[in-house]
Each structure stands twice: as structure tokens, then as C-alpha cells.
Amino acid sequence: MIIGILLCDDVRESLRKKHGNYPKMFSALFASVDAELAFNVYRVTDGVYPESIDECDAYISTGSRYSVNDDAPWIAEFQAFIVQLFRLKKKFVGICFGHQMMAKALGGEVMTSSKGWGIGVTTTRIKQRPIWMAMDVEQLALVASHKEQVTKMPAGSVLIAGSEFCPCYMMQINDHFLGIQGHPEFSKSYARDLMMVRRDVIPAQRIRAGIASLSLAVDDELMSQSLLIFLQ
């Protein structure tokens, strides 16, 4: 199976030597589930896309420091590509920025949250368990890092997980589009370092709470198993 990684940003240069870039994080996430997976990387921030949709069996997008509401040519082009994937019924998982773009591209809305940044390990209640979810849990714990949220889901969306802080944490549209606000690919170590380099934009009290939350267990391995079932 070939998974296309739609690269919407890079890990900050100051953190890249220690943690690697986002494609490395995703390949490591799935390696424990299926070592035979192959990945193609497309730097969509530079306008790089597959020559044919069928170059890959499925696609997954990274997070980004940018907003889906930014007025930048590459973001508009990325939105059009997401619409194309949807119309062609290609399997797609949107992570954080990708989750938000999936919502916006298909008629939903994304806004800066009045509740502030969501950082650290966040716990979200499963609202509806789809058949591909390979975990028998009532709650899902993943690392998060976002200040915007999906505030209106597209028509036809099914809410899979949500919380009071982030009502639309995970949603699915038909059997081929899935969006997740959290980051199963982020390690706790990377999450901590990312919080520290964002101290100038995130309130100190929220940073302290986010770092304290890193003592909680996360469901990244179970989530990776579920994502692979979905993508297949």
C-alpha cells in the first residue's frame, strides 16, 4: 500500500534535528502496524502534487502553523485538491490543519476558538464508534496543538468524537474521508518542545497545564491501527 503524505508545513528547523520532519513522524507511526507500507511525499506548500491521483492508494495530510482561512495561493490550491479527492472517492485522512481544510473545502466552517489553544494531551469522548475503529474505549487521548477548530461540519458528516473544549474533534464523511483534530503522529517529547518554542504566543498558564498533561497515557498506537484499517 502506498500512502501519499500531503506536506502542509515543516517542523521548525530548531526542532528538526531532534524530532525529524513530519513525514518521518508519520512513517514511524505506521511502521509498528505495517512495516511494508510505502510513502510518497508531496510538498503542497510549494505546489507539488501527484501527477495522477492513483499514484497513491490513499492520502493523509499533516498539520500546519498556517490557517485554512489564510489568503495564500497554495492554500486555495490545496483546498481544490481536497475537493478533487472527495469527488473521486479517494481515501483521505486529514490531521489537524487537514481536518479543518476537509471541513472548509466541503462546506463547513473553521474559526479561532474562543477557548484558546488546545495543547498537550487532550481526552475526547467517542460519540459513535465506526466499524474501522480498532479500539474498545469510550475516550480517546491524543496530543493536540491548535488554536482553530471546526465550528460547522459539512453536510453529511458523522461526528465520531468530541468534547466540550473541541466539539468536532473527529468526523467522517462517507466511507472515504476522515478528519482528526489531534496528532497521533506527535511524540510527547516533540509536543513539549513545540510548546516551549511557542511561549510567546501561548499563555504561560496554558503551557504549564499542557506540559503537565503529558504525564497521561495516549492512544497513538491504537489510533494508528484504526487509521490503517480506514485507509485500506
Image (cartoon, grey):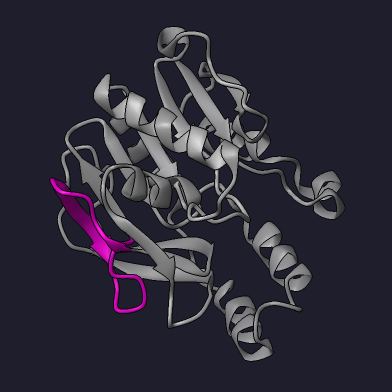
| 231 sits left or right of 188 in the view | left
- Residue 5 in the image: state x and y as whole percent: 54, 29
Instruction: Please indicate, yes or no, whether residue 231 appears anywhere in the rendered image.
Output: no
Does residue 34 appear to the left or right of 187 in the view shown? left
Quadrant for the C terminus in the image: top left
Q: Position of residue 80 (x, y in %)?
A: 41, 32
Residue at 16% across / 50% down in the picture?
A: 158
Q: Position of residue 160 (x, y in %)?
A: 22, 55
Query: Foreground: 79 or 36?
Result: 79
* Residue 198 appears left or right of 132: right
- Residue drawn at x 26%, y 48% is 107
Say which of 26 and 87 sits in front.
87
Can you say which quadrant of the picture contains the N terminus? top left
Q: Is residue 165 magenta?
A: yes
Residue 10 in sight here:
yes
Question: Which residue is found at the position 29% from the left and 32% from the top?
Answer: 230
Please indicate whether residue 159 sits to the left or right of residue 201 in the image: left
Query: Which is more toward the observer, 110 or 29?
Result: 110
Q: Is residue 220 above or below residue 214?
A: above
As drawn, the residue found furthest toward the bottom would be 205
- The magenta span reads 151-169
Q: Position of residue 45 (x, y in %)?
A: 64, 36
Residue 195 within the segment the image draws in magenta: no
Task: Identify the residue at image location x=59%, y=45%.
Answer: 72
